[in-house]
Every structure is written in structure tokens, then in C-alpha cells.
Amino acid sequence: MSSSTLAPSARESNAIYFAAHSSRASAAAEILGVIAREAGPGVRLGTKEELRARCEVSVGSFNEALKIAQNRGLVTLRPGPGGGIFSQAPSAIVRLGNLLLALDRDEDTVAEAVHVRNALDVLLMDDAIVHRTDDDVRKLRHEIDLMAQAVAQGHPTDFMKANWHLHAVIANISPNSILRNFYLGLLELIEQHTLAVQPTRDQPLQGYIEYRLDLHSRMVDAIEGADQKLAQKLVEEHNTESYQQ
């Protein structure tokens, strides 16, 4: 079915999404998500061309939309005879402040890992302040730059990954091998089980990651300035918004 033969109600419905999104690809990804949720998990939604027509976008925009929907865990693409685009079973969700992490099915483990990780942050910040070198500071600033790039591009999942890498750099400053390796193991576990980062309804996502970028930049400032009192205050602010299921 071509877009020109879509029922008026379908075209009107699509217009709502196009008006609410800055790009046709992101609007189409939202439409795909609605189609997938209405169909239920594991249902064949159609071919790429059928769904592209339903979304009323170009091939390029639809391909981008499909990648977005796949990254969000909403749809999956199956090749070959009988293949096509299928709705995906919803992933587990864990909340981090005003972000939602879409996970695989191990949400209890992730929530526990983050709880322990948060408790160790103050110890690692103390070690970073005492033992950091100029090279360590340069590495920290590089990670802040990567976080800033993700914020500028509006990519929350890339932002969160850069955030975790920043914490890994902080951990690697510590001379305490048990503390360092345990913390890095927790970070690896959290990252492995996270599929995507999504917004909540509580606060605009862009504003929230901008705030978190500023917070982490101030944490690096405290490390560089060897300001232990400020570092402890910032860690407390950082971990106030803990994971909630």
C-alpha cells in the first residue's frame, strides 16, 4: 500500500508525530513503536516497504527510523523467507534519576550492581584526589569532551556510555587493586546489560543530560584541584538519584 492510499485517519495520526519531532526519522521511529506495542511482542509487522509507506517517509528516513526503533528494543529485523520487521518483547526497565535504562532480562542484578557502585564512588574520588597525575586529568577531560559531544548531538545512550568510561578512568587512578577491579567489574556488568537510554516524563531528556554533564565536569574540577570537601559533596549529589525499579 502506498502512502497516497493511506486512510485519512492514518495520515492524520502520522501528522501528530511529525509535528512533535524535529526530524521525520525520529517521528517514524515513534510510529514504529506505536505499531509494535499495539501488535504485541513477537508479531510480524510487515516488510520494510510496507512499514515505510505506513510511516510516510523516504527510504533514507525510514532506515534511520528503523535503527532508532531497534536500538530502543522495539522491533527486530528478520531476514529470509517469512522474514520482515517484528515487534520485540519489551526489555526490562531500570530507572536512573530522570533516565530510563532499557535492559535485557537481568534488571535485579543491574540495580544491585549500581547500588554497590554508588557506595564505592566516594572511596575512588578520595583516591583520585590524592593520586591523580596530569596525564590522568587529561584523560578525564577527554571523557568529558566525549560526553559533551553526545549531549550536543542529542544521543543519551552515547552520553551514558561516555559517563561510565569517565568513571572507569577515575577508578583506574586508584592504587587499591581490589577496589579498582571490583568497581570496574560492576561498571562492565551494568554496561553489558544496558540496551538503550530513554527519557522519562519527569523532565526533558536534553536538559537532564546537560545537567549531568555539568555535574561530572565539576567532579573532574574537584579532582584536578584536589578539593576533597567539594568532591564528597558532588558525589553525594551524583548518587542522590539512584536506580529505582
Image (tube, rainbow, N blue to C red):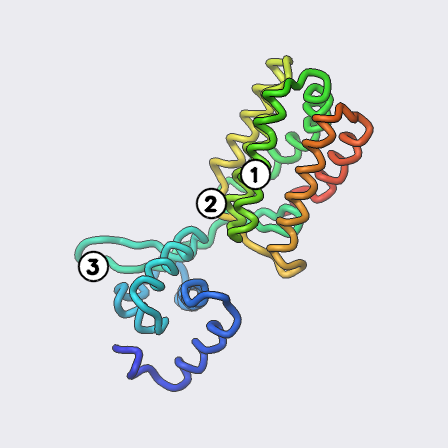
Given residues 20 and 32, the one toward you in this image is: 20
* Mark 1 residue type: Asp
Q: Residues within 10 Å of mark 3 (few under 14, many from 20)?
A: few
Residue 232 horizontal side relative to residue 184, left or right: right
Residue that mark 1 sits on: 145
Q: Judge depth for marks 3 and 1 and give the one in front.
A: 1
Residue that mark 3 sits on: 82
Q: Residues within 10 Å of mark 2 (few under 14, many from 20)?
A: some
Q: Earlier in the sequence, mark 3 or mark 1?
A: 3
Given residues 210 and 34, the one toward you in this image is: 210
Q: Position of residue 71 (x, y in %)?
A: 42, 51
Q: Earlier in the sequence, mark 1 or mark 2?
A: 1
Figure check: 171 above or below 211: above
Label 1 – label 2 distance at C-alpha: 23 Å
Q: Residues within 10 Å of mark 1 (few under 14, many from 20)?
A: some
Q: Position of residue 186 (x, y in %)?
A: 56, 29
Q: Residue at x 49, y 76 (%)?
A: 16
Q: Position of residue 109 (x, y in %)?
A: 56, 36
Quarter the N terminus occupies: bottom left
Q: Residue at x 30, y 78 (%)?
A: 3
Which disc is residue 195 wearing?
A: 2
Q: Residue at x 80, y 32 (%)?
A: 230
Given residues 159 and 146, the one toward you in this image is: 146
Residue 244 horizontal side relative to residue 188, left or right: right
